[in-house]
Image: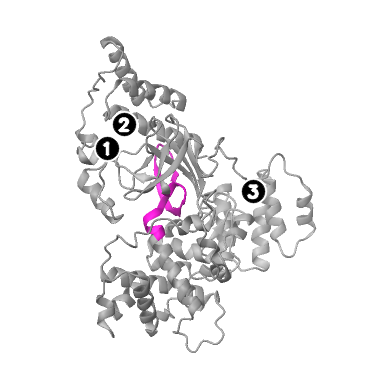
Amino acid sequence: MSVQDIFNEISLTKDESIWESAEDSNAWNRKRIKFLSEYKECMFEKILNKETSTARKNVKLSGALLMKAQKTQETSAKLKLLSQALMFCPPGEVMDQVLRVRARIFYNIDKISYCHEDIKSIKKRNEDDEKLLQYQANGSSDTNKDQESLLTEPNKKYKNFTSKIEVNSARNKGRFVIATEDIKPGELIAEENSIIGVADAKFSRDHCDNCLISLDDYCLPCSQCSSVAFCSKLCRDQAKHHSVECLLLDQIYRADTGAWHLALRLVASKPAQFWNTAEYKQENQDSYASSEMSSAFHLVTHDDTADREAPILMKECMTALYFLRILQADGYFNNKGKKSQTELSKEELNICMLLLHFMRVVFYNCHEVTEYIDQDVIRRIGVCLNPSLALINHSCDSNYARVVKGRRSLAFATRLIKKGEQIYDSYSPTFFLAPRAERLEVTESYNFNCGCEACVENWPTQEKMSDVCKQMCTSKLNDIEFADLKDNLQEVLSTEENISVETIVELLLKCYDNIQHPDKLVLLLETKLHSTLWKVHST
């Protein structure tokens, strides 16, 4: 039985007034959580039974994968099978054997650092193993590569942004980001490592559970479950959330909690004692960094303005309680002196309310984690929370875009953003890609109706836009020069050869001086700039 099945089964039983109330307040949500916790079904005992977990280690399967790998000739296929064998292998003789075979392959293909990592992980090393450790890696290490920051002049207060912005606030806008100097297309606006992230279920075994990068030849498994792998020991050590999710991750995915899963990971990333203090609520007035829990805590939740219906409120509270039961199953709390299993201590109730708070934070502020495949194919592989980029407000005519690798996001201007102009993200598809009615459905789910220029003037989508460029009245080009500009624009858009970022930016700047916005070809060139930035920075 799934969490949704349990919700359906117990709905409108016992006190109907609680089920039917649409009052959204801390007092009422505490009441809902206490009420739900009294249901035996809301212990989720069958769902959260680690003894019956599908992610338990399987030494027979691991051995079979090892045998298959040894019969495989192609190196990458062999390494993939060995990594799968490690995922299912409990610590012991078979794991040592798998590590030993994989280490020798890494040695043969000159990935000595990976070789050394595997040898060091072997519990009972032999003489040949020790000899492999004597070989020195040429050049830099294959593992734990730290990416150098591309943000050359960071903002003094908003550490993840360029110095060319400031963050303001207004009653009807909340916080928003504006340019304090002209920002050219292709220029880096922000660089952010998300405070937390989670891969979608189908990518959970081939992407690092911590940093979310794609796992290629090398991976490290969890020692207790077969649900996740890591790209390095550093990531395995940093993934504090996994001790709570270990052997339960498949059940969490089946509960279909979506981005709410990030709330569980945020809480699980810190010990229970951390949340007993007010430290995470205290904002630093002189500094705002994405790594600080206070930055995540104070993101918008729309508690006072969202019109949540009674079933949604109950579903939210039940999901928060489900996450709390996962924490309990891991021994997250000191439960001495509790009278019953269903009873919630004061600490547990506070944590459950915190989970509910973060569920709303991530709902309104999370970003997709995407990755570049090839030929301009970009796919979603998960979600993350970027407390800095979440400060950027919405427009259906956005002027910046992200290049993402795992939990690292690079935010680039895709258009000339002049001093004093606001920087805009697009929470929905842009006006260029989707009609207003479709965009409105998305923005309403974020608790606002968009009033950007594209919506107010109902700009046409790409399919309905003309290819004819309209010359600005302030343009200084004569007819021949303007025709040459259009030809150049069409030529760049039609070419299949790689064109540099600098070439595209130069052409865009000339277009902004001479062609009226919105223009189909210019918008397509901005899209080409984004795809080119992906190619340059995603490797």
Q: Secondary structure at mark 3?
A: loop
Earlier residue among tags 1 and 2: 1
Q: Could you tell me if residue 529 is visible in this image?
A: yes
Please name the amino acid that badge 2 sits on.
Leu
Marks 2 and 1: in contact by CB < 8 Å?
yes
Q: Secondary structure at mark 1?
A: loop
In the image, is residue 132 part of the stretch drawn in magenta? no
Segment colored magenta: 361-390
Q: Could you tell me if residue 209 is visible in this image?
A: no
Mark 3 or 2: in front is: 2
In the image, is residue 367 part of the stretch drawn in magenta? yes
Mark 1, residue position: 432
Mark 3, residue position: 143
Please name the amino acid that badge 1 sits on.
Phe
Mark 2, residue position: 523
Residue sitting at the far bottom: 339
11 left or right, relative to 317: left
